[in-house]
Amino acid sequence: MPLTVLSVAYPFAPVGPDAVGGAEQVLHALDAALIAAGHRSIVIAAAGSQVAGELMALPPIGDLLDDDAVARGRRAAADRITAVLRSRRIDLLHLHGVDFDHYRPAGPPNSPPVVATLHLPLAWYAEAALMPRPGTHLVCVSASQRATRPDLAGRLAVIENGVAVDRFAPGRRRCGYALMLARICPEKGVHLALDAARRADVPLLIAGETFPYTAHRRYFDEEVRPRLDARRRFLGPVGFPRKRRLLAAARCLLVPSLAPETSSLVAREALAAGTPVVGFATGALAEAIDEGITGFLVDDDAAMADAIPHCDALDRDACRAVAERRFALATMTDAYLSLYRCLAGIEARPGAAA
């Protein structure tokens, strides 16, 4: 029986194949999987999003994401959800934004079952968003993320993020540069990657986007831009084809996150491209990286610099094999589609009596 799933993105980040954020990439993959499986997918997301199903675009917010703009975006998301629920038969609502509690419907009997995927560190969510609520089902993206709130562990499911491993391949020729792919914001530690590359005397390419928050723009101007030079360059946003080429040819990927990584899709993509990862030992990176096999876990930028040359000795095929075995996109999408069917009442929960 076909389902109709309404997915709601973080209102300020477009969804699509070139999305910078992991939440937007996961939503894009689930939307495509729903359509491929013969279901109906409706997506509420920022203007400019690209989806396989039906897009209900939110109005543009403007050039600056200040408090007023954020409030307008949340109201627009809430109004759009209400309008869809009134006019369509929706089997399930899937929320992806860190601020989902601002536009989540009131709950049964006035709305369908709700899934909220917690893409970011649990400490970043309002406490009310994590509390039990009838009809709302919370999903973490890694075991390490769930472990940060042992008091809630019994109410938090885990579905690990996957990547399109088959869309990546190890490059025939490796170049000497290290690579960083990330949003340009303080918690991603871009300045530390630059310091590590300078200390190791290696080129660094940084691809990513600076979202229109005042703090993010200030961080780029004060911490990132002054560290750039002829050998350490900022490329700006890149589309998927260029990202794939950059990963395939890189010496290694750097992930100096200061906040606990809940998954790090880009680390998984790097391994799919046969590229080792050097990252800070935070959150789910410790689950994704096999020390001395697919990369290195380090504590600071000095240790990151020391680790970069050692990546040359790692087996690229081993990196790729780990990605194929552990991070397949279909594993993630199949798990979500099974959850959707369970909550819609057309499939028994695993282990339940027939």
Image (tube, grey):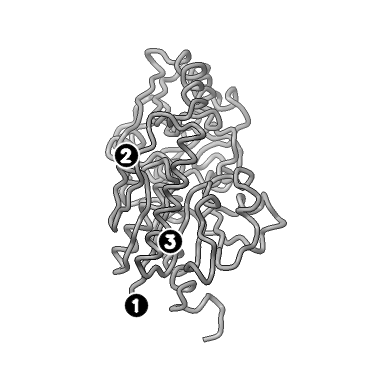
Question: Label 1 to label 3, Cα distance in Å?
Answer: 21 Å
Question: Label 2 to label 1, Cα distance in Å?
Answer: 37 Å
Label 1 crowding class (10 Å Cα cut-off): few <14, some 14-19, many 20+?
few
* Tag 1: amino acid: Met
Q: Which residue in the structure is indicated by mark 2?
A: 244
Q: Are marks 3 and 2 in contact (CB under 8 Å)?
A: no
Name which residue lies at 44% across and 72% down. 341
Question: Label 3 to label 2, Cα distance in Å?
Answer: 21 Å
Tell which circle, 3 or 2, labels the residue nearer the N-terminal end. 2
In front: 203, or 242? Answer: 242
Q: Which residue in the structure is indicated by mark 1?
A: 1
Q: Are marks 1 and 3 in contact (CB under 8 Å)?
A: no
Label 3 crowding class (10 Å Cα cut-off): few <14, some 14-19, many 20+?
some
Q: Are marks 2 and 1 in contact (CB under 8 Å)?
A: no
The image shows residue 180, relative to residue 148, as above or below, that is above
Is residue 5 something one can see in this rendering?
A: yes
Left or right of 309 on screen, residue 235: left
Q: Which residue in the structure is indicated by mark 3?
A: 331
Label 2 crowding class (10 Å Cα cut-off): few <14, some 14-19, many 20+?
many
Residue 158 % position (x, y) = 56, 59
Left or right of 226 on screen, residue 5: left
Q: Secondary structure at mark 1?
A: loop
Nearer the observer, disc 1 or disc 3? 1
Residue 307 % position (x, y) = 54, 28
Name which residue lies at 34% across and 63% down. 34
Tell which circle, 2 or 1, labels the residue nearer the N-terminal end. 1
Residue 64 % position (x, y) = 43, 29
In front: 282, or 67? Answer: 67
In front: 272, or 58? Answer: 58
Q: Please identify the quadrant where the N terminus is shown.
A: bottom left
